[in-house]
Image: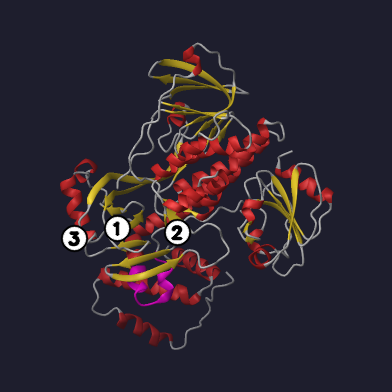
Amino acid sequence: MAALVTAPNLPDHDGFYAELLAAHKGLTEAESAAMNARLVLILANHVGDREALREALALARKAGG
Amino acid sequence: MPYDYQEFPYVTPPPLRGMTEGRKPAVIVGAGPIGLALAVDLALRGVPSVVLDDNNVVSVGSRAICWAKRSLEILDRLGVAERMVAKGVTWKIGRTRHRDEEVFRFDLLPEGGHKMPAFINLQQYYVEQYLVERCRDFPDLIDLRFRNRVTAVERFDDHAVATVETPEGSYRIEADWLLACDGAGSPIRRMMGLDFAGELFEERFLIADIVMKADFPSERWFWFEPTFHPGQSALLHKQPDDIYRIDLQLGWDADPEEEKKPEKVIPRIEKVVEGRPFTLDWVSVYTFQCRRLERFAHGRVVFVGDSAHVVSPFGARGGNGGLQDVDNIGWKLAAVLKGEAGAALIESYDAERRHGADENILNSTRATKFMTPAPGIERTFRDAVLALAAHAPFARGMVNSGRLSLPCAYPPSPFLGPDESALPAGTAPGRPCPDAPVGNGWLLARLGGGFTLLGLDCDPPEIEGAASLRLDAEGWLRRRYLGEAASAVYLIRPDQHIAARWLAPTAEDCAAALAVAKGL
């Protein structure tokens, strides 16, 4: 792990968490899945670092057990 | 005007006229664009060939229609590209729509300084006709045998023997090299029991050529989920003679025979062309696959084109990939037959073109997954890209309706010589020479058929086995081959791929690189 920031980096993380839930409010499970897919693509483009994204994909998969 | 199919005459082959035939240097099986192009390439190098084909007409239906710049450069070397460009529809703009909105637009050749356009559309039957006519320019070197079907192949260490069936009986023909250019369904591949591994996509497309007077611009139009064909994809391409190609996604469950019926086809197409009058010229239903042979060279039997690898049609990588095979094997086979190179050179065909096929399969598979995603997460991400494309520029580039064929750059190998990193990346060893204007003509036309030592703003060394050519580096030539450097020397292979390059080599450097490129 080198490119991906895994130490705390997000100001007011509780506030962001609430915004994330609020953004999904009223959506069905399928609509939420679609929204998450769009969000992943938007954030990936913003990150723009293929190595960091590769590490993020590996971490997400690993944490799922 | 639909094409007027002419039958090529069947001529009794010499063995059935009581004549004894010796072993032939090259027997080409299949008179499609690949087999015919290979016969011409060999003839230009003085190598005679016999071309066997089970049929006696050019391809029925437009089939391969998009010819990329590199293919046109190869076909220009073979002497048919100017005719193709004159007849074909030149295009460079592609538009992709989602529902009724344009989400992505590409311009294939924003850069000047090339003789050949980025792409032309021309039906495969014209290309075959032009190549057959070009073959007739070499009556002493090319022996075209129509209605000659290969029914068996025997392999030996230093030759192969084909059994050939004709309307008048069968005969055997011996070949130093047998080139299987017999297409995606290659009977020779089957006879040899070779595994054709890969992926079949569970999708069907309807393909139709229609004759229609319309003022559509010369562009490639692709639709995801258009209102005229809900939930599916569609593609429209303009061809010469007022013929348009339409591809419509049908879904895996569609019944091919049912979907080909005019009463099914016509209402669908009426929606695409918004009620303009048209007539149907050709209809077919296809599935697509990405597969390749594990090896293309099997002793004295070498697979070239679709017989060696198939891709889905989106991206125009079938015919274009096959022509790069021809370009690669032609000079190598000629050099081996003339004793100027070791048989190891055929191994470099195998390695280089497997690399090319893998690149085409990778691109084609990615496009196919985007265009026909599996239900579930593939579909979710595909729809996410399309939804975002209308709102965010980054997503437009991710919309994939086929990444169109670009010439293959061969990776570093024991057959490529030294590189000089001070020179531009676009002309590194392994890459095809980019064209550039030279005087009143073009660089590629100056390269001739053999190896060339090209000196840019310097005299190249004189060595045996390569023609020395000095050019003043101006404009595009300087930009593409020198960059910031004052002068350079390039060793260029007969297939116009760069073998090695230096700032100031000695004759010994050049001779060593030439030996490497010839597999000596």
Magenta stretch? B384-399
Amino acid type assigned to the residue bearing label 3 in the image: Gly
Q: In the depicted view, which residue is nearer to us: B382 or A16?
A: B382
Is residue B411 something that shows in the picture? no
List x then y, in percent, for residue B466. 74, 45
In this rendering, the count of numbered labels is: 3
Amino acid type assigned to the residue bearing label 2 in the image: Arg
Q: Residues within 10 Å of mark 1 (few under 14, many from 20)?
A: many
Kind of element beneath mark 2: loop
Chain on which label 3 sits: B
List x then y, in percent, for residue A49. 53, 72
Q: Residues within 10 Å of mark 3 (few under 14, many from 20)?
A: few
List x then y, in percent, for residue A9. 51, 83
The image quarter containing residue B295 is top right
Residue located at (59% from left, 20% from top): B23
Q: Is residue B244 above or below residue B260?
A: below
